[in-house]
Image: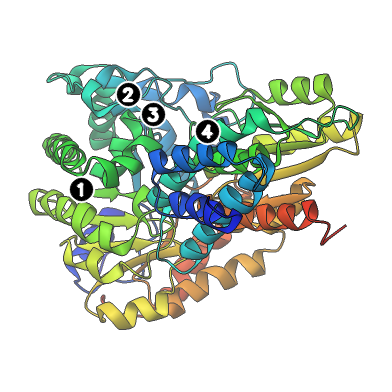
Amino acid sequence: MATKEELLEELIEAVVEYEEEDCVEAAQKVLDNPDVITPMEGVLDGLAAGMEKVGVLFDTHEYFVPEVLMCADALYAGLDILRPHIEKDDSASKASVVLGSVQGDVHDIGKNLVKMMFDIAGWDVYDLGRDVPLEDFVEKQLDTGSDVLAMSAMMTTTMLGMKKVIAMVKEKNPDCLIMLGGAPLTRDVANLFGADGYAESAGNAVSEGIKMIGNLRKYEKGEIA
Amino acid sequence: MAALTGKERVMKMFQKEPIDRMPCFSGQGTVTVQAIEKMGTQFSKIHNDAELMAGAALTSARLWDLDGLVIPFDMAAVAEAMGRGVSLYDAAEGIIYPTVPNKWRDLDEISVPEDFMSKGRMPIIDDAFKILKKDAPDLAIGAWVLGPFTFGGQIMELDILLKGLKKKKEQTEAFLSQMTKVTIDLCKHYESLGVDFICVREMGSGTDLLSPRMWKTLIGPNLKLVFDAISVPSINHICGSTDMIIEMMHECGADALSVDQKNNLVETREKVGNDVLLLGNFDPYGTLTTMEDTAEVADVIKKCIDDGVDSVWPGCDIWPDVKKENMETYVQTVKEYGAKASPAVKRI
């Protein structure tokens, strides 16, 4: 019988080597060995840990965006198998996020990488897609009362729209955490807009998103409060 | 001796002949809201009407006393002409550039119509060039096109294209060859309309997205074919991270290289030598739209010149909503601080 470490290693390797079928197989093995490993461990210490390794490869210029996208596909293939089997804690209210690319922006690579992070964490994700009119962000956030609103704009030409959305949401829901991501944004610009977090580019979204996955794993293990 | 016209100044720069001062122009969009307001129109309308397109470019150039101008303003026209639709955001408040709403999702679906050059807004762009050739004989009139890879990402989903580079290499290479032919045809078409220079923007191919190795095998060879085919002065522009590919960019054979603020220009100049025309590399939004102090703007422009550009170019489209005094400072600083010779271009 496989050990927990072996099962996790299979998941990690499948993600890092962007092998979707291997990831499905490894995830199925996790389900087949309930005495050894839980689906949640498979997600956090297998899939997410694999993605952390991908982050290192990306930071060291061994992997670039095409490889990361394929690793993400492998991760989702495994997540689709494991997620339905994770026991839900009905007593706790689930965290939620509204995300999308701002109107005028038809790019969604960065947004989808950020989305992956929330999917791994098991949040309720309201993905509005791309080229999303500003009022739709506000409407959905107010409708769901989401903890986080994450908006992406890859082009310089679309990022100004975010400023208005932030003002409108913060006015009615000051506790909502707002994340901005997109290639043309700098930290200064994000500060100017009044946002709480930002990712500079698809590349940074990869690095930052994966670091957040790392923090999430520590949080789940009780290593950080 | 009579002062050079803007066109003479720009064309001499491309020939690396001595000029009176550094030319101030760009191969990226340089339309500004002040010009659009002066014309009494709206940003969303200048993409869809030849008179307004030419007028917005020319009014901007005259307002800021630039040496050249460039059209069109958006990157959706060719994809639209290939049947992928266009979102012009007529009803949206503020400035939103047109986008392509219906990209192909699979390489097998792609079918490039033979007659795309006569479809959609393409004839409007043609007419705008004709107007500018008539109304602005003293200015360098430029066209810009997307590079083959970036254009491919306009007609098909970028994530699928990126993954295709690894998963379906042969099919993706064939697609990029097809896009190269489209790019060349478009450049030749613009040449036939009498444009003075062509800026090829392979903006999606920096090492933020692709590895240098991928760039070398899939991007560089196609760009070389494009620049081999262009007979007017040409610019190889890539925004984002370019430090690792700048030498390969140079090998593609364009008359000039253009990079954005992420490039370490001092190192680039060392790598390519003083004989190569380098254009760049300030952040247009961070400089012209947001800076509060014109002294800061002047410092940014001076740094570009000190670092070794032959013309100060924004790293992207100038965001139309510039501050008047920042734009004036940009142009004035180029004229004054750029009076001295640049690495590749001497002075009269």
Disc 3: host chain? B
Q: Earlier in the sequence, mark 1 or mark 2?
A: 2
Relative height, residue B259 to residue B166 (above, below): below
Helix, strand or loop status at disc 1: loop
Inspect the image, locate mark 3, and give the three-letter code of the amino acid beneath it.
Met
- Label pair 3/4, CB-CB below 8 angstroms: no
- Label pair 2/4, CB-CB below 8 angstroms: no
User: Can see residue B84?
Assistant: yes
Q: Residues within 10 Å of mark 4 (few under 14, many from 20)?
A: many
In front of the other: label 2 or label 4?
2
Q: Earlier in the sequence, mark 1 or mark 3?
A: 3
- Label pair 1/2, CB-CB below 8 angstroms: no
Residue B81 image point, x, y percent: 27, 20
Inspect the image, locate mark 4, and give the three-letter code of the amino acid beneath it.
Asp
In front of the other: label 1 or label 4?
4
State the separation of the CA atoms marked 1 and 3: 18 Å
Q: Residue at x 58, y 28 (%)?
A: A103
Disc 2: host chain? B
Q: Residue at x 38, y 80 (%)?
A: B267
Relative height, residue A33 to residue A1 (above, below): above
Inspect the image, locate mark 2, and give the three-letter code of the amino acid beneath it.
Trp
Helix, strand or loop status at disc 3: helix
Q: Residues within 10 Å of mark 1 (few under 14, many from 20)?
A: many
Helix, strand or loop status at disc 2: loop
Q: Are marks 1 and 3 on the same chain?
A: yes
Q: Residues within 10 Å of mark 3 (few under 14, many from 20)?
A: many
Q: Which residue is mark 3?
A: B53
Residue A209 image point, x, y percent: 62, 51
- Circle number at residue B104: 2
Q: Which residue is mark 4?
A: A105
